[in-house]
Each structure stands twice: as structure tokens, then as C-alpha cells.
Image (spheres, helix red, strand yellow):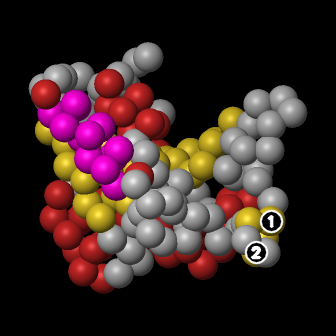
């Protein structure tokens, strides 16, 4: 995997840390990573904080500079805390999939993305706990230079929104 010059990464909604570990393991050693998760919040599971903490410890032992931040991604104190650890070359949003949640995460963290901000489940319009997920609605409304990847037959997908500075310089 080519890291495309990414040496700082923020993931919002890490759950047990599997995707965070995968991405960080493909960045150059010494890269900075921040895992932001709210384990007991909507869609979270008990025990995932311990697993994510173990992932962070493993990555740090391998020469990465990683930390976990636990809390609500829409809380102003949490936004300020994460902002103080940035900016980030790449941000991956996989937290609250309801329309207000994903919209807030985009608005709050997009200014801290140097290259891109990506979103999980852009093709997902399923019902979870009696609520329709809003990422696909959000993706249809978001403006800017964007690309999407939805595998044939998949209901998930990844959407990439390039930062204004990356779009202006032709980076992708």
C-alpha cells in the first residue's frame, strides 16, 4: 500500500481498532495516529476501549506515535483536544452514522485535514436500532472534490473528500 505521503492520521469511530491498526501499519514508521472513539455511545460496545488501547500499545511498540482519545466526537472539548494533536494528512470518519452525527464530524474535523477526509458506509441506507443511517444522504449533499469506491454488490463504500489545499495543488 502506498501511503501517498500520509504521516499523520485521525480515525473517528475506531471500535476495537482493527482498521486503525491496518492503516497505521501501512504508514511510515514514526507516523502519528489518533484514534477517537466513544465506546459506550451509539453503536459502541463494552470492552472495545481495552482492545483499542491494546492496538495503540502495539503500534507504539512498533515505532509509531499513536494515542487513543475517548469521548464524544461532537463535544467541543473533544474537538479542541483532537485539534491540538493535528493537523492530519488523512482523516477517516466511521463514527455516528446518523445524518446529524456524520455531518457534525465533517464540519468539525474537515478543517484539520491537510489532504483528505474519508467516510465509511457512503452507500449504506440501512436501519440500525430503528433509525435510518444518514451517511448516504450526507454523501449526496457534501460539496467539494470527491471520489467514491463502492464494490459491486456492496452496501458500504468509501467516499473521499479531498481537502481544498490538496485539490488546488492537484494532489490526490
In the rendered image, which quarter is residue 75 located in? bottom left
Q: Position of residue 164 (x, y in %)?
A: 43, 54
Say left or right for 70 vs 12: left
Q: Kindly identify which residue carries mark 1.
A: 127
Residue 103 vertical placement versus 49 (above, below) = below
Magenta: main secondary structure: helix
User: Circle 1: is it few (<14), some (14-19), or many (20+) Cα within 10 Å?
Assistant: few
Circle 1 — which element? strand
Circle 2 — which element? strand
In the rendered image, which quarter is residue 46 located in? bottom left
Residues at discs 1 and 2 in contact (Cβ within 8 Å): yes
Residue 6 vertical placement versus 139 (above, below) = above
Q: Kindly identify which residue carries mark 2.
A: 131
Q: Position of residue 146 (x, y in %)?
A: 61, 48
Q: Position of residue 161 (x, y in %)?
A: 54, 50
Give the residues in magenta: 49-60
Q: Residue at x 32, y 24 (%)?
A: 25
Q: Residue furthest bottom?
A: 76
Q: Position of residue 95 (x, y in %)?
A: 51, 61
Residue 40 vertical placement versus 85 (above, below) = below
In the rendered image, which quarter is residue 7 located in? top left
Q: CA distance from mark 1 to mark 2?
A: 5 Å
| Residue 62 drawn in magenta | no
Q: Residue furthest front?
A: 47
Amino acid at each position: 500500500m502506498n501511503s501517498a505521503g500520509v504521516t499523520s492520521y485521525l480515525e473517528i469511530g475506531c471500535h476495537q481498532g482493527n482498521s486503525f491498526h491496518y492503516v497505521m501499519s501501512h504508514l511510515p514508521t514514526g507516523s502519528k495516529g489518533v484514534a477517537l472513539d466513544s465506546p459506550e455511545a451509539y453503536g459502541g460496545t463494552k470492552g472495545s476501549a481495552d482492545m483499542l488501547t491494546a492496538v495503540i500499545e502495539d503500534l507504539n511498540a512498533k515505532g509509531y506515535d499513536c494515542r487513543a482519545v475517548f469521548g464524544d466526537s461532537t463535544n467541543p472539548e473533544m474537538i479542541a483536544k483532537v485539534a491540538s494533536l493535528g493537523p492530519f494528512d488523512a482523516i477517516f470518519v466511521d463514527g455516528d452514522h446518523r445524518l446529524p452525527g456524520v455531518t457534525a464530524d465533517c464540519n468539525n474535523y474537515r478543517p484539520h485535514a491537510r489532504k483528505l477526509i474519508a467516510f465509511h458506509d457512503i452507500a449504506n441506507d440501512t436501519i440500525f436500532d430503528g433509525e435510518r443511517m444518514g451517511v448516504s444522504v450526507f454523501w449526496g449533499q457534501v460539496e467539494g472534490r470527491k471520489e467514491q469506491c463502492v464494490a459491486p454488490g456492496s452496501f458500504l463504500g468509501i467516499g473521499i473528500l479531498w481537502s481544498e489545499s490538496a485539490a488546488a495543488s492537484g494532489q490526490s
